[in-house]
Image (cartoon, grey):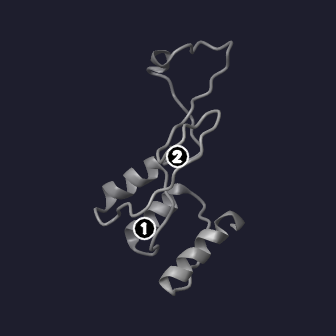
Amino acid sequence: MQAYGALVAAIEARTGRRVNLVMPQSYGSVVEGLVAGSLDFAILGPASYLKARQASPDVRVFASYAKRGGAYQEEGPYYRSLLVVRSEGPFKEAGDLKGTVVALTDPVST
């Protein structure tokens, strides 16, 4: 919650309205809140945004942020992910994953 303090303060200063920051239980609950109109805005990853947009055309992007470059992230306003496998396992390239099951922490996790 503290990581978003500066963002909340900036939004409040620019809009003149109080912002109530909520940390949800899942990406799905954020999507449901946006679609139902109980949330005014949210920070979404690519997969949760697409799910929300499919459920309601009223959900739209109004801002984005750019990430700093690092070992696994190129600099810029886009998302990059990694799939990590065991070196001694059967997966050596992306095609080896065809027909397998991948476990994610949340169904709408990118």
Q: Looking at the image, is 12 positioned above or below residue 92?
A: below
- Identify the amino acid type marked 2: Ser
Residue at image coords 51%, 60%: 43
User: In this rendering, would 60 be left or right of 82?
Assistant: left
Image coordinates of residue 5 in percent, x first then y, are 66, 71
Label 1 element class: helix
Q: Quadrant of residue 52?
A: bottom left
Is 73 on the left or on the right of 61, as rendered?
right
User: Is any atom of residue 99 visible in this view?
Assistant: yes
Q: Nearer the viewer, residue 3 or 10?
A: 10
Q: Residue 98, relative to residue 82: is it above or below?
A: above
Residue 20, x across and y down, in percent:
58, 78
User: How many other residues sit within 10 Å of disc 1, few (<14), some (14-19) or many (≥20)?
Assistant: many
- Position of the N terminus by quadrant: bottom right
Q: What label sits on residue 109 in the rendered view?
A: 2
**What residue sits 45% from the left and 52% below the top?**
48
Q: CA distance from mark 1 to mark 2?
A: 16 Å
Looking at numbered disc 1 in the image, what kind of residue is underneath it?
Leu
Task: Residue at 68%, 63% (x, y): give it.
Answer: 3
Looking at the image, is mark 1 or mark 2 earlier in the sequence?
A: 1
Disc 2 secondary structure class:
loop
Q: Which mark is residue 34?
A: 1
Give residue 106's mark.
Answer: none
What residue do we see at 59% from left, 64% from top? 24
Instruction: In this rendered view, identify the residue nearer to me: 4 or 40.
Output: 4
Where residue 92 sits, quadrant-wise, is: top right
In this rendering, position of residue 101 left or right of residue 59: right
